[in-house]
Amino acid sequence: MPNDEVLKTVFPLLNGIDLASCMAVSKQWRDIARDDYFWKCQCAKRWPSICKRPNLSTTSYYRLYQSFYKRQNHQILLPPKLSFDTLEFYIDIWAGDKLIYSGIVQGSVFEDGIKLPPHRISSVLRYHLQATEYKMMLAVEPTFKLPLSQPVSVSVLVGRKDSNKIARIIHKAMFDYIDRSSYRAMAFDAIDISPMYRFLPNIRGWISLLFMEGGDECEIDVFGIQMDFNDVANSKDEVLWLLDMLDWK
């Protein structure tokens, strides 16, 4: 069987990624692999109904597959309207009915993170602090001890200095999960999104208490607080856009 015929027999059996890789082997393979019939086969595996159209409006099945075979994640956000310099966060933590921590945190402090972590932290947590992904963190000075023998809860409000408006991020969420392997206690709540964005339900805000290594099994020694919205926002601009969508009052 001639070489061309072998390729034409094999190419329809490949998946789209492998077929695209074949186009880089040689000019002969590229010319054969670009045959729109092979790409119609690929499209038929993913979107059978589109192949039933008598006249495809796009230029080719190859172009159709190239455009839609995977979700595009490189959209560029417009600059956010908010900035951390105009925000301040109000954080309150209770153990039972006793207020353990209460602080007003400037947005710029949350953005700067923990520059000098204490010596008595685990290597796992130290690696987490040094990782390059975006994080909102603040150091707690002085540290505070949190008893685990009673329910611990947290509330977080955020204020805008430019308009004097307040929004709620977390309301009396319980720290139900203590992860001693990563030295974090975690709580979450559905944030209050503006009614203008009803199509964005149940977006969660997370608060993590970062605690020291060792110590008593009945309490944790907290040195830092982390807040994130990793369900939907993983960069500074994404977080600011999300905060702008809160139900400001």
Image: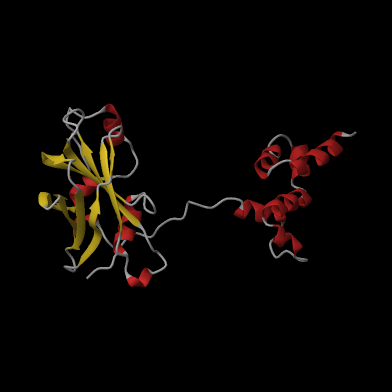
Placement of the C terminus among the 4 image quadrants:
bottom left
Relative image position of residue 185 (x, y in whole percent): 25, 42
Determine the image quadrant of residue 77. Answer: bottom left
154 to 163, vertically: above or below: above
Determine the image quadrant of residue 44. Answer: bottom right
136 to 10, vertically: above or below: below
- Between 89 and 8, the one lying in front of the other is 89
Please state the total of marks drawn on the protein image.
Answer: 0
Relative image position of residue 143 (x, y in whole percent): 12, 38
Placement of the N terminus among the 4 image quadrants:
top right
Relative image position of residue 157 (x, y in whole percent): 20, 59
Image-based side of 105 in relation to 136, left or right: left
Q: Residue furthest front?
A: 149
27 to 85, vertically: above or below: above
Say which residue appears at 20% left-offset and 56% top-offset: 155
Say which residue appears at 39% left-offset and 63% top-offset: 201
166 to 115, vertically: above or below: below
- Between 207 and 79, the one lying in front of the other is 207
Say which residue appears at 34% left-offset and 55% top-offset: 204
- Between 210 and 14, the one lying in front of the other is 210
Image-based side of 56 in relation to 164, left or right: right
Relative image position of residue 79 (x, y in whole percent): 34, 59
Q: How is the image coloured?
A: secondary structure
